[in-house]
Image (spheres, rainbow, N blue to C red):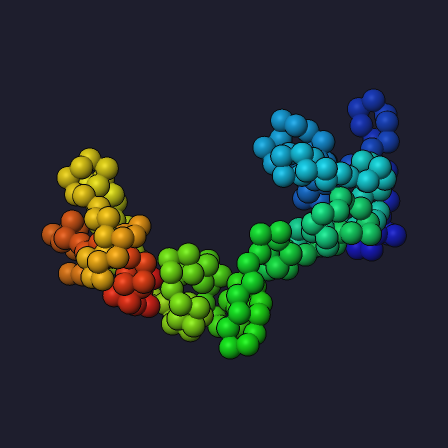
Amino acid sequence: MLASDITFGARNRQGRRTHGRSSTRTYKIWAGMKARCTNPNEPRYPDYGGRGIKVCARWMRFENFLRDMGPAPDGMTLERRKNEKGYSRQDCRWATDAEQNRNRGDTVLITHAGVTQCATDWAEQTGIGRKTIVRRLDAGWPIQDALTVKPVSLTDEERKLRFAVRQRLTRAVKSGKVTRARECQKCGRAAETQAHHHRGYSKESALDVQWLCPGCHRSRAGPSDE
C-alpha cells in the first residue's frame, strides 16, 4: 500500500472520525516512538527524550506519520538514519534488524585482513553468528580465530547437559564449595579466570575444572565456544 493511497474513515462511538488503526503494528511502532521521546516514565526515555531526541511536530499525529511512512513492512522497524537527530520524514526509514545493528551508536568496527566492518557484516560474510563473534572477542579470542573458527553444532541433549553442569558449578562457587582461582592454572597469569571442563561435560565431573585466563581458555575450549 502506498502512503498516498491511505484513507481515514472510521468513526468511534461518539461519531467522531478516527484513523481506525490503533490495533495495527504501525500504530504500536508510532506510539512507542512517541512514548520514549516524551514520557519520562517510559523505561527507554533516558536514551531518547532524555538525550534530546524529539518527534517532529507533524508526527505527533499518527495520521501524518502514516501518510509519510506508509504501513510498516513485515520484518522491518523504524530507524533513524542519523542517531543524533530526532524522528522526522527526512531522517527515518523502515529497516531490517541487520540494518538497524549497523547503525547503532555502540557498533564496534572489526578489522581483519585489511577489511573493516561491523560484526553484523562479518556474520553475514562468515556464516558465524553475530552474537558468537562478539562473545568470542569479549572472551579474548584473536580476531582471526573469532571470524574463522566454525562453532561445533551441539544436539539439544548436549546443550541441556552443558547447561546443567554449568549451573551446578555456579552454585558451588556461590556457596563456597568451589573457589575460583585468581591466576590462570596454565600460564600463571593473574586474570578474571573462566572454568574449563577438561574432562568433558558430565554430572560426575561437573566440579572438576581448570581455571584459565581468556586466552588459555580459548585455546583449550576450541571451536565449541565453551
Residue at 14% across / 53% down in the picture? Answer: 208
Q: Position of residue 127 (x, y in %)?
A: 47, 70
Residue at 58% across / 52% down in the picture? Answer: 106
In the image, residue 168 above or below residue 4: above
Residue placed furthest toward the top:
14
Residue at 72% across / 31% down in the picture? Answer: 38
Can you say which quadrant of the picture contains the C terminus? bottom left
Q: Position of residue 136 (x, y in %)?
A: 40, 61
In the image, residue 122 above or below residue 19: below
Side of 226 where 36 appears, left or right = right
Whether residue 46 is visible here, answered yes or no, is: yes
Q: 132 and 23: which one is in front?
A: 132
Residue 22 location, quadrant = top right
Q: 137 and 35: which one is in front?
A: 137
Q: Position of residue 89 (x, y in %)?
A: 82, 49
Q: Position of residue 138 (x, y in %)?
A: 42, 56
Side of 225 where 75 appears, left or right = right
Residue placed furthest toward the front:
189
Whether residue 74 is visible here, answered yes or no, is: no
Label tally: 0
Q: 29 and 121: which one is in front?
A: 121
Residue placed furthest toward the left:
204
Can you say which quadrant of the picture contains the N terminus? bottom right
Q: 33 and 108: which one is in front?
A: 108
In the image, residue 66 above or below residue 139: above
Residue at 33% across / 68% down in the picture? Answer: 223
Side of 101 where 19 appears, left or right = right
Residue 18 location, quadrant = top right
